[in-house]
Amino acid sequence: MSFADLKAKAMKLDSLVGAAEQDGGKKESYAQDERKWKPTRDKSGNGYAVIRFLPAKEGDDLPWAKYWDHFFKGPTGQWYVEKSLTTIGKDDPVSEMNTKLWNSGIESDKQIARDRKRRLHYVSNIYVVNDPANPENEGKVFLYEYGKKIFDKIMDSMRPQFQDETPVNPFDLWKGANFKIKIAKVEGYVNYDRSSFDAPTPLAEDSQLEAIYNQEYSLKEFTDETTFKPYDELKLKLTRVLGEAGAVTSSAESMELEDSVTTTTPTPEIKKPPVDDTMSYFEKLAAEA
């Protein structure tokens, strides 16, 4: 929707939460992408920044895009870094191979499948409020790629667990809230647990908000079928990365492995059609306008 319509048709929080629930490294394709921002960490692994998540750009269904990829190094020393076709509801050669390895019943095969499992990514437009390590980024709009941990915090703000907490739509320009990113190194891993939202407040005056809104980027490319390599091309690359000895193939259905490396029981993956049910959310908005 246009900026003029955005304030009048502010996103209904319950519908936004419902859309998220239904939706139930290096990047080859986006290397050196100047549109993207990420928090800077110091030598000890700590980092701090303040950002504001922005609403969906006109033409986008939601203020976030969601996709899966695979990122691993094969025995040949080559890397496999590709988006997974399961994102758009299609068979993917790595997921098929992981299924074969997992179903072998051999623990070493299961570990290989874990090491090559899918990684979940979210992408949103953000406004950088405070970036101490790179102050030149402040006051600018970027794409921000983040994982499930931060998305869970977004969901918690929209769907709080306690009665004394008020639901907040963090993507709202007027009633949203700044997000304080606090990064720490915990047991060798990057940890975002201390990150949190501030109290709700307008991001800026309306005249400034329109200029910010007009700088947003479309998120369609991250889930557009044309941005995914075809199955045969991915399978050929997988064969090169693994070498002939590792070129195991299988026609078994794709299976999603749990995020935890301690997973011992496979969870069947339910494939979804490329088009999300989130369109019903916008149809509801139109009906309520």
Image (cartoon, rainbow, N blue to C red):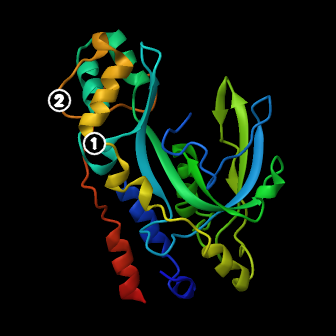
Element under disc 1: loop
Using a 10 Å C-alpha cutoff, classify the residue at mark 2 as few (fewer than 14 neighbours), some (14 to 19) or many (20 or more). Answer: some
Residue drawn at x 64%, y 52% as measured from the top left: 34
Quarter of the C terminus within the rendering? bottom left
Q: Position of residue 63 (x, y in %)?
A: 50, 65
Return the residue nearer the eye: 104 or 209: 209
Q: Position of residue 40 (x, y in %)?
A: 74, 42
The image shows residue 90, relative to residue 190, as above or below, that is below
- Find out whether the residues at labels 1 and 2 contact each other: C-beta distance under 8 Å: no
Disc 1 and disc 2: Cα gap in Å?
18 Å
In the rendered structure, which amino acid carries the disc numbered 1? Answer: Pro
Return the residue nearer the eye: 63 or 220: 220
The image shows residue 234, relative to residue 19, as above or below, that is above
Q: Which residue position is annotated with label 1?
A: 230
In the rendered structure, which amino acid carries the disc numbered 2? Answer: Ala
Q: Which residue position is annotated with label 2?
A: 252
The image shows residue 47, relative to residue 205, as above or below, that is above
The image shows residue 99, relative to residue 167, as above or below, that is above
User: In the image, which is nearer the foreground, mark 1 or mark 2?
Assistant: 1
Residue drawn at x 71%, y 46% as measured from the top left: 39
Q: Where is residue 232 in the image (x, y as percent from the top left)?
A: 24, 35
- On the question of residue 151 being in view, the answer is yes
- On the question of residue 162 being in view, the answer is no
Which comes before the other along the chain, label 1 or label 2?
A: 1
Q: In this view, does 252 lie to the left or right of 264?
A: left
Element under disc 2: loop
Residue drawn at x 18%, y 24% as measured from the top left: 250
Q: Which of the 4 image quadrants contains residue 256?
A: top left
Q: Position of residue 277 (x, y in %)?
A: 30, 64
